[in-house]
Image (cartoon, rainbow, N blue to C red):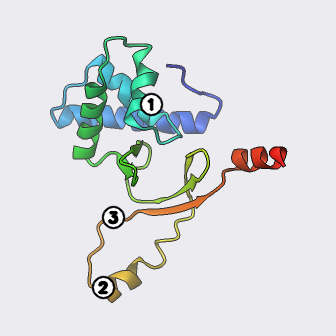
Amino acid sequence: MILDKSHPAQFDADEQRFRHLTVKAHEAGFRLTPQRRAVLRALVFSDKHPGAEELFLQVKGEYPDLSLATVYKCLDMLKAMGEVLQLEFRDGSSRFDGRRPASHAHVICTRCGAIEDATADPFTWCSDDVSIETGYRLERYRFDLYGLCPDCQAQATRQQ
């Protein structure tokens, strides 16, 4: 697996997140095999919110004996620790955010399926109002915005 070091600050943050997760997994009693560590690293260093199959294909080149079950067990371990955000979609697929496990907004491309984290979080300003209106004590949320990513916009412009 080749790690992108072209953005040193993000690389350092990802490396620190990876170390945090390995320590936390160890403290929680989870066994971190080299394959699980590779899956964990691939997830943390990804900015694309990969699915389990994507992680499997990415790591399988380095560990040919890796099974898809190992990837799912690693993701389940992270979910049990509250350290991954699972984005479930109506078609039954899931994508995972290993960098930011807390609820936050995402922008999703309607053409290619790319997912980006939104730094501005439109839900935070209304969460108190929603709690008051409904009586719910909010624990987490899912807020997705849909549109065309810059690459798909450029492609659509070229096709016109």
Q: Which amino acid does label 1 sit on?
A: Glu
Could you tell me how far apart the alpha carbons at marks 1 and 3 are, in whole angstroms? 26 Å
Crowd rating for badge 1 (residues with CA inside 10 Å; few <14, some 14–19, many 20+): some
Residue visible at 41% across and 62% down in the picture: 142
Q: How far apart are marks 1 and 2 (CA)?
A: 39 Å
Q: Report the amino acid beneath label 2.
A: Thr
- Above or below, 137 against 22 in this view is below
Instruction: Pick whichever of labels 3 and 2 is earlier in the sequence.
Output: 2
Tell whether 67 sits left or right of 152: left
Q: Earlier in the sequence, mark 1 or mark 2?
A: 1
Tell me, yes or no, whether the two marked residues, 3 and 2, touch with CB atoms within 8 Å: no
Q: Residue 140 carries which label?
A: 3
Where residue 148 sits in the image (x, y, percent)? 66, 54
Q: Percent x, y for residue 33?
A: 26, 20
Label 3 element class: loop
In the rendering, at what x and y percent does residue 118 appear? 56, 58
